[in-house]
Image (spheres, helix red, strand yellow):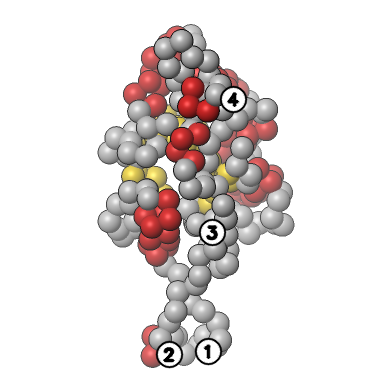
Amino acid sequence: MAVTVPPPRVAPEDRPADRPADRPADPPRDAYASWYAEVLGWPVSEGPPAELVTGVRFDVLEVPADAGERLLRRPLATGPVSFAGHRMRFLVAAGSADELDGLLDWLEWGGVALDLTALGAGGRIPTPVPPGHPGGSPRGAAVWLRPPEQGCEALLPSLPGPGQDAGPRHGGAGPDLVRLVAAAATECHRARLWPRTPPRSAVAGPRAGRPGQTLAGQARFS
């Protein structure tokens, strides 16, 4: 369900003299935090800057942008995905960060330098611009490539339970943490072997071209 976040109201005396009276002020990034707390119920750290807290409603797998772009092209189900500072962050079920090292060992990636990390309890990630915000995304701000929805935590990639197949919380049809980690490790390894210049949209942000191109073209939740 898409939620539109209205722009903040600014009193006349607080409006800069060089800005037209009918032009709303650009909202501070910390103002986005209220949307996550009130609409999604996600914990947000006190700023500045405010950040999303990991390890409570979700954990995060973090990969380089070029590896993440290849990963998004795979026919692989994921949860929400954000992008900031040449890094992509894939939201996974809470507690998944503790499983990463064991999964990499089991998948025979143990000891290989992959630049694949996980954030769990006590971690923080930049707060992306809320989906559907009418003001767009300021240059350099974190953005959603696959935005979150209410209740999406129940569909995040997770480990199968005993006697269950992938995606135990949604009938075996949802994201599987093992497959996601395996694919992420492969793409991170490829990115290290064959480094390349990040796409223009990854360098300049979502304003470097029309929406729907390269990274922004992946901005659909699946």
Quadrant containing the C terminus is: top right
Mark 2 falls on what kind of element?
Answer: helix
Please identify, in this view, whether the residue under mark 4 or under mark 1 is nearer the observer.
4
Is the residue marked by circle 1 packed among few (<14), some (14-19), or many (20+) residues within 10 Å? few
Q: Is residue 137 visible?
A: no
Q: Are marks 2 and 1 in contact (CB under 8 Å)?
A: yes
Q: Are marks 3 and 1 in contact (CB under 8 Å)?
A: no
Q: Amino acid at mark 4?
A: Ala
Front-most of residues 163 and 178: 163
Q: Which residue is mark 1?
A: 21
Instruction: State the separation of the CA atoms marked 3 and 2.
Output: 28 Å
Residue 144 vs residue 213: left or right? left
N-term mark: 3 or 2: 3
N-term mark: 4 or 1: 1
**In the depicted structure, whether residue 68 falls above or below residue 188:** below
Instruction: State the separation of the CA atoms marked 2 and 1.
Output: 8 Å
Q: Which mark is residue 173?
A: 4
Q: Position of residue 69 (x, y in %)?
A: 62, 36
Q: Which mark is residue 12?
A: 2
**In the depicted structure, whether residue 219 falls above or below residue 107:** below
Please identify, in this view, whether the residue under mark 3 or under mark 1 is nearer the observer.
3
Please tell me which residue is depicted at 53% across the width and 41% down the height of the picture: 81
Mark 4 falls on what kind of element?
Answer: loop
Please tell me which residue is depicted at 39% across the width and 45% down the height of the picture: 125
Q: Are marks 3 and 2 in contact (CB under 8 Å)?
A: no
Q: Quadrant of residue 180?
A: top right
Please tell me which residue is depicted at 67% across the width and 28% down the height of the picture: 74
